[in-house]
Image (cartoon, helix red, strand yellow):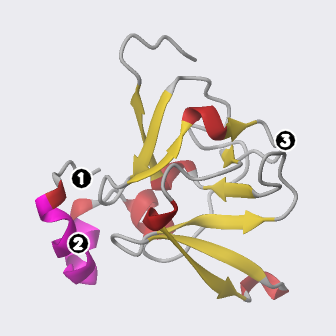
Amino acid sequence: MISMDNAQEGIHRQLSDDQWRQRLDANTYRICRQGGTEVAFSGCYWDTKTAGSYHCACCNALLFDSTAKFDSGTGWPSFHSPAATAQLSTHSDTSASMLREELRCATCDAHLGHIFGDGPPPTGQRYCINSAALQLIPATGSAGS
């Protein structure tokens, strides 16, 4: 995972495939740079209750807050809303013989997961995200599981 400040954000869109391969572990690379999906219930964040903020595993951009996380029963971390909509971009995804809305990090273009219209209030949306695409920054003094 990459730690960086705001001044470095712009360079991440310009990294080559080889540079991403060198910076990320194999699983994170497969998911974030090649559009892969982790097996349900296998990621480290699908059931975590730790308070904090979820950032992009590739560029550290803020994506979600733990207060928007809910148990969707799907085996992937799910959120009803992003922390900052400007950090996400959406794209049509017709892979897997279905039409879905893919979510990517707007800063570095990493594949994060998909958005579905079956989430809870207040948005009715389910942002279904691969754990490997996230980095949890625990809130100060947070004790979670």
| Residue situated furthest left in the rendering | 7
User: How far apart are labels 2 and 1 at the CA level?
Assistant: 10 Å
Q: Magenta residues?
A: 7-22
Q: Nearer the viewer, residue 87 or 25?
A: 87
Q: Looking at the rendering, in which quadrant would you find the C terminus?
A: top right
Q: What secondary structure is the magenta-colored segment mainly?
A: helix
Which residue does the numbered mark 3 point to in the structure image? 73
- In the rendered image, residue 67 lying in the magenta stretch gets the answer no
Q: Residue at x 54, y 15 (%)?
A: 144
Q: Please, what secondary structure does the residue beneath circle 2 have? A: helix
Which residue does the numbered mark 1 point to in the structure image? 2
Q: Residue at x 34, y 71 (%)?
A: 108
Please state which amino acid type lies under the numbered disc 3.
Answer: Gly
Q: Position of residue 27 (x, y in %)?
A: 45, 58
Mark before the other along the chain sequence, 2 or 3: 2
Please state which amino acid type lies under the numbered disc 1.
Answer: Ile
Q: Residue at x 45, y 14 (%)?
A: 142
Local packing at callout 2 (Cα closer than 10 Å; few below 14, some 14-19, many 20+) is: some
